Image: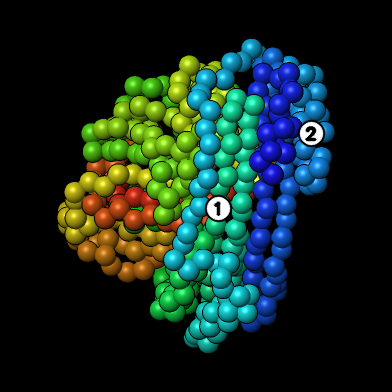
């Protein structure tokens, strides 16, 4: 395979040509209520060629490896017609690497039947719980072997396992419906989801408890975010603004995301780190053959970096960060996050709560959206804070605001960093991409909170 991919690049006249070829085995199991909706094993293989000619890119995909030479020729032809601003990619040394991740209990060693039996147990726990009307369980895993070759002398093989699980319970009382859920993931380690029985019971309990919870009175409160929701906020509201393709393409974003601009206090540090191989967003090399890196985005409250592909780095006069990623061979790599998080501080949660007379404590995530610097997030679990203590449960609340103003208002950061590996990231039609995000508990001095 190596010789075939490398040979396809040998005689190209393009400025840069690269080929990716992957083989993927995947499992998917879903439940809706008591019913099993899907239990499937799939295998897929295919590749793509990407070429750069005079600043323009061409892309062609294929399923038969025998078509790799033709796909390279087509990608070069497309690039020649696409045009663009002159572009010289950052130079690099040739590389030769083979990377394999070896989880403790790899998904490939667990049968479909064993996976289903475990999920049956989780379904039965939820459906036998009081006031629960239905549930939704989505399990997926995959094992990808990806080979990359480039005309500037790189050849990389990577074995990429992945696992994701979402469990949700839906409770009903008359016309009132509430739900709670939990999302988890791992780098293909099945043991990460094998002993979740108590957690699943708690999901059902919370869904039922929400039926009796009160609504928050809308307004501005001091808000404490748990590590999961603070991590999602970091990823969605700030991380995407750090992706250089978005910044480069938007004059408004270039003005907002100026290196050296202060966004928060000296206690605020935000990092994107692909080198953490134990997390779903980790990798040794991105899909352009650039080594994964640890990139400081905010250091001591000041914007000091952003996430780059080789192209955006060249166009903006900065260094590649190893953040060009594609969900599979059908897509070109684009700038994406890896493991994005707020670095820990030293404030205890009890101290964060102590001087709050009336505030809101929010945990987990339910949904949300961002539009440039404006955000709206729904918390999965919420409580009033009264006289320094977590008090009564609330029905789902929504946090809204401006990300830059909100970062400035983070006045306390805990030491209890935790990473969320559930779900996946979507961008430009490529979803779900495995990522992780996290944070310690953080306190925001003022944030608009509303019910729904």
240 vs 187, nearest the viewer: 187
Any mark on residue 160, and which? 1
Identify the residue shown where x is 55% and y is 57%: 161
Q: Nearer the viewer, residue 288 or 4?
A: 4
Could you give the CA–CA distance between mark 1 and mark 2, rounded to whole angstroms? 25 Å
Give the mark nearest the N terminus, 1 or 2. Answer: 2
Pick the residue in front: 117 or 389. 117
The residue lying furthest to the front in this view is 3
Q: Residue 346 got which mark?
A: none
The residue at 41%/43% (across/down) is: 275
Q: Position of residue 303 (x, y in %)?
A: 35, 28
Residue plotted at (51% across, 66% down): 106
Which mark, residue 69? 2
- Is 153 located above or below residue 55 in the figure? below
Crowd around label 1: few <14 · some 14–19 · many ≥20 (10 Å): many
Q: Is residue 4 visible?
A: yes
Element at badge 2?
helix
Query: Measured from the top left, where is residue 253 in percent x and y?
Result: 50, 25
Q: Quadrant of the N terminus?
A: top right
Residue 342 located left or right of residue 85: left
Residue at point 38%, 54% (across, down): 419
């Amino acid at each position: 395979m190596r010789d075939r991919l490398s040979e396809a690049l040998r005689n190209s006249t393009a400025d840069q040509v690269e080929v990716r070829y992957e083989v993927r085995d995947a499992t998917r199991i879903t439940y809706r209520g008591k019913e099993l909706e899907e239990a499937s094993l799939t295998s897929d293989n295919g590749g793509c060629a990407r070429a750069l000619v005079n600043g323009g890119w061409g892309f062609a995909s294929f399923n038969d490896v025998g078509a790799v030479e033709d796909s390279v020729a087509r990608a070069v032809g497309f690039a020649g017609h696409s045009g663009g601003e002159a572009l010289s990619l950052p130079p690099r040394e040739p590389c030769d690497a083979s990377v394999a991740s070896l989880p403790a209990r790899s998904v490939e060693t667990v049968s479909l039947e064993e996976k289903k039996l475990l999920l049956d147990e989780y379904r039965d726990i939820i459906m036998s719980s009081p006031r629960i009307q239905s549930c939704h369980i989505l399990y997926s895993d995959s094992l990808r072997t990806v080979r990359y070759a480039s005309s500037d002398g790189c050849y990389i093989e990577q074995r990429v396992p992945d696992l994701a699980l979402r469990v949700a319970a839906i409770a009903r009382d008359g016309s009132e419906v509430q739900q709670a859920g939990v999302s988890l993931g791992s780098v293909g380690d099945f043991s990460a989801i094998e002993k979740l029985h108590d957690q699943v019971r708690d999901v059902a309990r919370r869904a039922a408890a929400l039926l009796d919870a009160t609504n928050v009175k809308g307004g501005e409160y001091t808000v404490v975010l748990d590590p999961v929701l603070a991590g999602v906020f970091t990823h969605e509201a700030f991380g995407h603004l750090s992706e250089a393709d978005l910044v480069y393409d938007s004059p408004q974003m270039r003005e907002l995301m100026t290196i050296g601009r202060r966004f928060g206090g000296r206690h605020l540090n935000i990092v994107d780190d692909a080198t953490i191989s134990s997390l779903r967003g980790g990798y040794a090399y991105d899909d352009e053959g650039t080594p994964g890196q640890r990139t400081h985005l905010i250091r001591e409250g000041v914007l000091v970096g952003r996430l780059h592909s080789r192209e955006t780095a060249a166009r903006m006069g900065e260094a590649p960060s190893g953040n060009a990623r594609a969900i599979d061979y059908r897509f070109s790599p684009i700038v994406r996050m890896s493991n994005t998080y707020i670095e820990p501080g030293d404030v205890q949660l009890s101290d964060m709560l102590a001087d709050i007379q009336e505030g809101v404590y929010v945990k987990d995530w339910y949904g949300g959206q961002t539009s440039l610097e404006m955000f709206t997030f729904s918390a999965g679990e919420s409580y009033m804070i009264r006289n320094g203590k977590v008090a009564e449960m609330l029905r789902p609340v929504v946090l809204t605001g401006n990300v830059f103003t909100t970062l400035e208002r983070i006045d306390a950061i805990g030491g209890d960093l935790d990473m969320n590996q559930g779900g996946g990231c979507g961008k430009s039609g490529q979803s779900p991409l495995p990522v992780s995000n996290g944070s310690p508990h953080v306190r925001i001095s003022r944030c608009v909170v509303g019910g729904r």
